[in-house]
């Protein structure tokens, strides 16, 4: 087999065989295929797409490139949840304890944030004392005993995807729905859960910008799940405005606690969390959506969800009562009156990242105490001088003013 002929085949929009895909991608992992040839193939894929058969093949090659977690020592059905990423997305912190309190086992290994989106692990690490690096044996024991563990990855899952993603990032080849589907699903399959719920974020602050692309991604993810006999459900949720009021690690944990304590029930964040938890409970306990939703709401209202959150945070060494936010804050006020039409998620996310809430490049030190809290939401009436948001700064007083993130008419 020869790399040029495989690239040429894809350029001519012909279907590649499993062996041809394996030859190119495995070759890239072991150094036989150079970056320039892999980049060329990736661009041909971006432009011409992939058939379902090719997507399933690529996912399988990604999965087999690394470890595959065996969760069989955890009793019961394990349901995993994944979000394609967005600004202020703290849903895992809320949804995981709800479903664990209802008896669905959650063994979730999450990642750190990079760029303007935060990662669950960074948010958890903002809780003083919280240990994200448990040994695998301890994770399994904890999930069997209290139903939930949220940790960083213990194994080398899908290293080929990691290498390919790094190349996509610098060759303008991230934005391909087939490549995104394979890249996300290979890690979910390798993580070992029986059932998987994917929250596909769509909007200005998300990787996926249009509803049409989100629906296409959803369809592909379900097909990949089918090929592994794993039930995959997807929800498509809005990411044009930040999710919730808080953006930044400690601030987001504080907001998550408030939702778990039953506050904010008329907010979009509450609704998204209830919806996600409903699907996880429905999948994990074989309940109808109506039954599952009633259970989820009761769990929040009765305080059982918050009690489970406290229990697992304590078990992993954390102390929620000592969360810290920066004392150096600045209130941003409206310079006109009107109705808020939009709050640009991307601009708010970039501000928070610039303040230091997430790593701009691998290895950057994070400031857990910085971020933004929104005081208004879309549809609110504002008057000249009203507080729009508070910025929690680090040591520096330097920041860009986010006024133009608020579209007021
Ligand atoms: N997240 C991933 O893990 N992979 C993609 O391709 C895009 C988002």
Image (cartoon, rainbow, N blue to C red):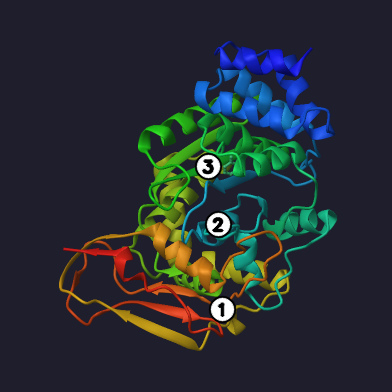
Ligand number 1: quarter of image: top right
Q: Which residue is mark 1?
A: 369
Residue at the spot x=56%, y=21% of the render? 50
- Residue 287 vs 224, above or below: the answer is below
Report which quarter residue 14 is drawn in.
Answer: top right
Q: Are marks 1 and 2 in contact (CB under 8 Å)?
A: no
Q: Within 10 angstroms of label 1, few (less than 14), some, or many (20 or more) residues?
A: many
Q: CA distance from mark 1 to mark 3?
A: 29 Å
Say if 334 sits above or below 235 in the image.
below
Q: Nearer the viewer, mark 1 or mark 3?
A: 1
Number of the front mark, 1 or 2:
1
Residue that appears at 72% across and 69% down: 316
Label 3: few (<14), some or many (≥20) within 10 Å? many
User: Is the N terminus in the top left, top right, bottom left or bottom right quadrant?
Assistant: top right
Q: In the rendered view of the protein, which quadrant contains the C terminus?
A: bottom left
Q: Report helix, strand or loop for mark 1.
A: loop
Whether the residue carrying mark 3 lies under 8 Å from ligand 1 is answered with: no
Q: Residues within 10 Å of mark 2 (few under 14, many from 20)?
A: many
Q: How many marks?
A: 3
Pointer 3 residue: 198
In-front residue for pair 177/225: 177
Q: What is the C-alpha distance between the residues marked 1 and 2?
A: 20 Å
User: Disc 1 or 2, which lies upstream in sequence?
Assistant: 2
Q: Along the horizontal axis of the image, is 288 left or right of 145?
A: left
Mark 2 C-beta closer than 8 Å to ligand 1:
no
Q: Could you say which disc has been placed on residue 325 in the image?
A: none
| Residue located 62% across and 64% down the image | 359
Is residue 243 visible in the rendered image? The answer is no
Q: Which residue is mark 2?
A: 92
């Amino acid at each position: 087999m020869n790399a040029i002929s495989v690239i040429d085949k894809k350029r001519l929009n012909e279907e590649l065989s499993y062996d041809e895909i394996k030859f190119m991608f495995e070759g890239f992992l072991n150094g036989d295929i150079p970056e320039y040839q892999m980049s060329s193939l990736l661009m041909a894929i971006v432009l011409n797409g992939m058939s379902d058969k090719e997507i399933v093949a690529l996912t399988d090659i990604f999965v087999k490139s690394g470890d595959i977690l065996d969760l069989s020592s955890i009793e019961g059905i394990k349901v995993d949840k994944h979000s394609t990423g967005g600004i202020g997305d703290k849903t895992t912190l809320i949804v995981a304890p709800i479903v664990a309190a209802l008896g669905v086992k959650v063994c979730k290994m999450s990642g750190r944030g990079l760029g303007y989106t935060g990662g669950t692990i960074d948010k958890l690490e903002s809780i003083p004392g919280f240990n994200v690096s448990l040994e695998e044996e301890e994770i399994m024991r904890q999930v069997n005993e209290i139903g939930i563990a949220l940790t960083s990855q213990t194994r080398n899952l899908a290293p080929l995807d990691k290498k390919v993603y790094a190349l996509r990032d610098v060759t303008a080849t991230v934005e391909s729905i087939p490549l995104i589907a394979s890249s996300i699903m290979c890690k979910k399959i390798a993580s070992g859960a029986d059932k998987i719920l994917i929250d596909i974020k769509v909007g200005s602050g998300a990787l996926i910008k249009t509803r049409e692309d989100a629906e296409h991604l959803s369809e592909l993810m379900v097909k990949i799940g089918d090929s592994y006999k794993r039930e995959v459900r997807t929800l498509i949720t809005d990411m044009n405005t930040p999710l919730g009021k808080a953006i930044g690690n400690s601030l987001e944990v504080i907001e998550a606690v408030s939702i778990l304590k039953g506050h904010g029930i008329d907010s979009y964040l509450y609704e998204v969390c209830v919806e996600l938890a409903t699907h996880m409970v429905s999948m994990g306990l074989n309940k109808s959506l109506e039954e599952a939703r009633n259970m989820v709401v009761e769990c929040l209202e009765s305080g059982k969800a918050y009690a489970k959150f406290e229990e697992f945070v304590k078990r992993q060494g954390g102390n929620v009562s000592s969360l810290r936010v920066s004392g150096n804050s600045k209130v941003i006020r409206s310079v006109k009156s009107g109705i808020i039409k939009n709050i640009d998620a991307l601009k708010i996310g970039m501000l928070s990242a610039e303040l230091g809430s997430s790593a701009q490049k691998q290895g950057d030190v994070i400031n857990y105490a910085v971020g933004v809290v929104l005081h208004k939401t879309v549809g609110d009436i504002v008057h000249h001088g009203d507080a729009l948001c508070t910025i929690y700064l680090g040591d520096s007083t330097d920041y860009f003013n986010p006024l133009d993130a608020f579209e007021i008419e």
